[in-house]
Image: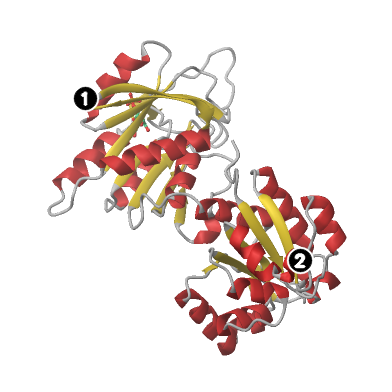
Amino acid sequence: MQSLLNKKIVLGISGGIAAYKTPELARQLMQEGASVQVVMTEAATQFVTPVTMQALTGNPVYTSQWDSSISNNMAHIELSRAADAIVIAPASADLMAKLSLGLADDLLSTLCLARDCPLLLAPAMNKQMWEHAATQRCVQRLAQDKVTLLGPASGFQACGEVGMGRMLEPSEIAEQVIAFFQKKTLLGKKVLITAGPTFEAIDPVRGITNHSSGKMGFAIARAAVEAGAQVQLIAGPCDLATPLEATGKIVRINVTSAREMHLAVLNDADYDIFFAVAAVADWGIAKPSKEKIKRQGKDAPSIEFITNPDILLDAAKTVKTKGGKPHPYCVGFAAESTDLEAHAAEKRQRKGIPMVVGNIGHETFGSDLNQLLVVDETGSKKIAKAEKLQLARQLITLVAKKI
Ligand code: C5P
């Protein structure tokens, strides 16, 4: 699935060393289906060549407003009219200052002033320049003008210093551009998500876990942030990057056991929606050994299990009894080996929740694809096989309509 299909993006590049990453950004936007038209400032051509950008995008690259090859020489009007968005990466301190004042003394700044489409800037500059009162004034003005800032991040800078002002990585910018185009169906909502497996320690080196990769839960977290929600993601042990982390709209809490996950969920009951996607161990180990259990002849040790708390059940109950607060909309998940529909319906009743989503088939563990069966008060309906992110967006749309 391409998330930027049919989108026309003008990719502006201003003069900063972070421009060495912009060819990769162009490639990633195109991989998502966007057509990319590059416009560079004169200074940008010192860091990356127009030929590089032209070869990657397959489109001519514009650097001057005095280019006689552009039809009727109105590039600043034509380019912005055709665009769904202008994305500038890197956006230098100088360019941001110009844009905040409405100056238009080269093709890129003129194009921005003449636009009637959204403008997204990925700032990149030395930390002193970023922190300077003049730059911060520009940032405020740009926000008032509804310009979207992507980053910057903090970290190692080309000048050798460490601090705020680093351009986001191309993948983070692309992720945020994709998010920008998604419908804001959960604006102002708080969403809690559990994801991944849990791990129940037997001793310091051994434990019991399951095959959950966390991909479905993380996809739902991404789709929820894309839809405008503030997300808390409580993740069991899994090796996945936090989606849209640079937006500041997602807080991730890593936990190991079901009991830790239970505590983390019940710690903050103030949310509008709870997606319980984690594959929580039904049983924990009664007395995990503090030291590694040694082999003793041929005898296998016997392990005593205890029943873990039902996180979803407790979360649904707890918040329901909290005075004054509306109930969160709870969504449970079901991975069954037989009779999915009946089991999902039974889970919905048993846990007293409005929706259970069943994973159809067993190849879902670790896969990027899934197929879902949604069981709610209206009955059940299938969501056709698709990438987990696409399914997550469909689920978010569905749940947004319910609340
Ligand atoms: O039938 P089961 O109780 O395993 O239901 C699965 C659903 O309940 C999933 O949404 C899972 O995240 C949640 N669950 C939970 N705590 C448990 C077991 C399951 O939150 N201890």
Q: How many marks?
A: 2
Residue at the bottom extreme?
A: 133
Helix, strand or loop status at disc 2: helix
Which residue lies at the image location 61% right of the left edge and 72% below the top edge?
112
Compare marks 2 and 1 and give the one earlier in the sequence.
2
Q: Nearer the viewer, mark 2 or mark 1?
A: 2
Q: Mark 2: which amino acid?
A: Ala
| Residue 285, x across and y down, in percent | 41, 29
| Residue 26, x across and y down, in percent | 72, 54
- 22 left or right of 371? right
Q: Is residue 220 above or below residue 371?
A: below
Which of the pair 83/69 is nearer the observer?
69
Helix, strand or loop status at disc 1: helix
Q: Quadrant of residue 21?
A: bottom right
- 41 left or right of 207? right
Which residue lies at the image location 56% right of the left edge and 89% below the top edge?
133
Write down which quadrant ligand 1 falls in: top left
Give the CA separation, mark 2 to mark 1. Answer: 55 Å
Residue, disc 2:
19
Instruction: Give the crowd class for mark 2: few <14, some 14-19, many >=20 residues within 10 Å.
Output: many
Which residue lies at the image location 70% right of the left edge and 83% below the top edge?
105
Tell me the number on the disc at residue 349: 1
